[in-house]
Image (cartoon, coloured by chain):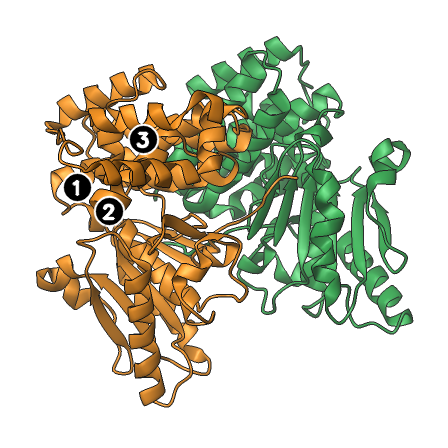
Chain colours: A orange, B green
Amino acid sequence: MFRNFKTVERIVFGRGCFNQLDEILSEQRKGKTSSVVFLVDDAFESKPLKNRVPVHEQDMLIWVSVDDEPKTRYVDQLTAQVSDAMRAAGLEKPCGVIGIGGGSTMDLAKAVSLMLTNPGSSADYQGWDLIKKPAVYHAAVPTLSGTGAEVSRTTVLTGPEKKLGINSDYTVFDQVVLDPELISGAPADQRFYTGMDCFIHCIESLTGTYLNAFSQAYGEKALGLCRNVFLEDHPDNDDMLMMASFFGGMSIAYSQVGVCHALSYGLSFVLGLHHGIGNSIAFDYLEEFYPEGVAEFRDMMEKQGIDLPRGVVSDATEAQIEKMVDVALILEPLWENALGKDWSKIMTRERIRDLYQKM
Amino acid sequence: MFRNFKTVERIVFGRGCFNQLDEILSEQRKGKTSSVVFLVDDAFESKPLKNRVPVHEQDMLIWVSVDDEPKTRYVDQLTAQVSDAMRAAGLEKPCGVIGIGGGSTMDLAKAVSLMLTNPGSSADYQGWDLIKKPAVYHAAVPTLSGTGAEVSRTTVLTGPEKKLGINSDYTVFDQVVLDPELISGAPADQRFYTGMDCFIHCIESLTGTYLNAFSQAYGEKALGLCRNVFLEDHPDNDDMLMMASFFGGMSIAYSQVGVCHALSYGLSFVLGLHHGIGNSIAFDYLEEFYPEGVAEFRDMMEKQGIDLPRGVVSDATEAQIEKMVDVALILEPLWENALGKDWSKIMTRERIRDLYQKM
């Protein structure tokens, strides 16, 4: 059985295409309700983009904080905030939820759009195909590129028990607006770490056991674009990075990430490290698994003048390290992709502990 | 304004995934009607694939002839045949139209699915965005790769006046089933000419004036895969060719084909040449426009042992050549993409005539 892959139905790409968002949303406003909810990274509260968000009178604009990675509690709180406001206005639901920001903001938009139609807490749906009802129409406007959140079927959430995505066809955005101009203002280190998310998941998927020609075609091109962006100098680096992220996300259709992502989830859950930097920290210690990829990653760090944090685990308690190991070990498909069916003989608790203790 | 590109919503890729078609269609059978119409290239009437088409009692299987390229008259006739059968069964419409075959068969499936919901003749809709109502659910199962018909927003038809596609977001398939096993049995020359459709439209789009990073990423990878397939030997050539076709089709989102496709339309309209071979014949005389592409094309012909037909225009009458020029000149976006805004100063009727007379 091969996955019948659900794609994003509408894609607009181009410098300045953010200006088309209002027109795109006008189609959605024609139904029972015309209220749109914009979830926007609060980093833009003091930036010119603020005044370009096409907010109508009946809409909600919520500045979201992504200082922490998205938590199920935060998703539930945002969902309640939207539901309460809709109820107060005599409406059932908004006609759309639009995420404007990086991977965390996009994941919040996905999760809120799902939770507006599915009862309970978002923590109940962490896993694979647990969502029963289609989400409210939801669209993404990335302002950072690399995660692939704009095309993936997951929204990665940190819950009370685990860091795990809501993986569902209903999670996939209905629309993405890919405007390379929006990513040009990101801080250099954030841009790098987010870009490395793409680079690393390409290395993991291309060397994994799950790969087929579909994912290989997307993964190879995404990897090539990462090399263009981080090892060379091109005037259209932003355009290329945006495409790398998109292709990297598509490559996951028939592949999986691997050792680095599994370890990075543990770092994020216990130490609160953001996904991109967590990946980068872990990857630097994975030469035995990905020798060429790690060498290239170090070239990219050097070329981009990035100074990777060291010793992030040194202050962790014994219990914290054990929890990291637990979180990493849950992610069986990632280990199987990286190391084959007998992965658990190769990747013991002890070996994972040793890796964490180096970081 | 950038096009808000409509994608195929569901894609399944993998060796043997054709076996999943019945399950995929079961979702569609749950509505008002459960009748599916299969349009299958009649080349399979005597092949084992015949017995693998998941035809239920209430379904129609129509063997379609693609000896000629799809004509509007044939589309209208097939549409009437389906409508009559549905009416006789007390049904309004089928719940799906499935095309199993190469580009021509896929285009017939697209066109019939559109004409089941839009009144009049398919010739009325040749052009851009003339379709008013969504099509019946339609899916593609390619058995030849290269045209990109599985992902494009056009169905190319030969009408009484012109060869021109029905270009519409509604034309796009709802589902594609990409099973590389299905293309392995195609005759070598047909495989080559269809593959060259992909190679040539990549060359045309990558050297054109319309290109952006989205189309470039898809086009470059498609071109690389064509090189893998036609200049090297790989055990998974079929998988790669299928992906090349898919990527080549996606690359057209923000680009256009060029000189070769424009000339090839004239050859097809007047002489009835199939699109792939028409492209190949024309391309071989376009060294002045695409020097590197033509050199590589010749290497591919040599490596694949292909003997290109020559002198196909030599018996054409004066009136026929004039008509070819007319058909080619209608395609303004193609010329503009290839030669820029002032294309009509560069590409005179005389120059097009001269090119045709060489072929």
Q: Position of residue B45 (x, y in %)?
A: 88, 37
Number of numbered discs on residues: 3
Host chain of mark 1: A
Residue B42 lies left or right of residue A194; in this view the side is right
Identify the secondary structure beneath mark 1.
Answer: helix
Residue A24 lies left or right of residue B115; in this view the side is left
Identify the secondary structure beneath mark 2.
Answer: loop
Frontmost residue, B272 versus A333: A333
Residue at figure coordinates x 45%, y 46% from the top left? B253
Residue at figure coordinates x 51%, y 66% from the top left? A134
The span from disc 2 to disc 3 (Cα, nearest Å) is 14 Å
Q: Which numbered disc covers residue A199?
A: 3
Q: Quadrant of the N terminus of chain A?
A: top right
Q: Quadrant of the C terminus of chain A?
A: top left
Residue A261 lies left or right of residue B139; in this view the side is left
Query: Can you see residue B320?
Result: no
Q: Position of residue B260 (x, y in %)?
A: 53, 32
> Residue type at mark 2?
Leu
Q: Which badge, 2 or 3, comes first in the chain's sequence?
A: 2
> Residue type at mark 1?
Gln
Residue at figure coordinates x 26%, y 59% from the top left? A100
> Residue type at mark 3?
Phe
Task: Look at mark 2 in the image and give the residue it sits on.
Answer: A144
Using a 10 Å C-alpha cutoff, classify the residue at mark 3 as few (fewer than 14 neighbours), some (14 to 19) or many (20 or more): many
Host chain of mark 2: A
Residue contact between numbered discs 2 and 1, judged by CB atoms under 8 Å: yes
Using a 10 Å C-alpha cutoff, classify the residue at mark 1 as few (fewer than 14 neighbours), some (14 to 19) or many (20 or more): some
Quadrant housing residue B87: bottom right
User: Marks 2 and 3: same chain?
Assistant: yes
Residue contact between numbered discs 3 and 1, judged by CB atoms under 8 Å: no
The span from disc 2 to disc 1 (Cα, nearest Å) is 8 Å
Task: Look at mark 1 in the image and give the residue it sits on.
Answer: A190
